[in-house]
Image (cartoon, rainbow, N blue to C red):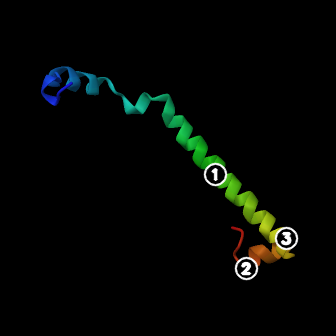
């Protein structure tokens, strides 16, 4: 298939059908971001616990907001 054989009018009408606001995949990245943030927070809390700091000490040091 050659680039010259592509119907550009058909391509432009197809692109107008793409509605990025209503795509169900928009929910998935948000969920993935939240899961990643939760994993990082859990890892941070594990490291604080392993270091021997109390939660109060970690807050005082600014490790926990």
Residue bearing mark 1: 36
Q: Position of residue 59 (x, y in %)?
A: 75, 73
- Tell me the number on the disc at residue 61: 2
Vertical comparison of 2 with 28: above or below: above
Residue sitting at x 62%, y 48%: 34
Looking at the image, which residue sits at the far bottom? 61
- Left or right placement of residue 36 versus residue 14 in this view: right
- Left or right placement of residue 1 versus residue 36 in this view: left
- Tell me the number on the disc at residue 27: none
State the SS at label 1.
Answer: helix
State the SS at label 3.
Answer: helix
State the separation of the CA atoms marked 2 and 1: 24 Å
Which of these two is toward me, 27 or 46?
46
Which of these two is toward me, 1 or 65?
1
Few, some or many C-alpha atoms within 10 Å of disc 3 (few <14, some 14-19, many ≥20)?
A: few
Quadrant for the C terminus, please.
bottom right
């Amino acid at each position: 298939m050659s680039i010259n054989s592509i119907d550009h009018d058909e391509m432009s009408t197809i692109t107008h059908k793409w509605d990025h606001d209503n795509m169900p995949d928009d929910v998935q990245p948000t969920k993935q971001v939240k899961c990643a943030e939760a994993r990082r927070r859990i890892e941070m809390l594990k490291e604080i616990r392993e270091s021997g700091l109390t939660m109060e000490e970690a807050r005082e040091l600014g490790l926990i907001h």
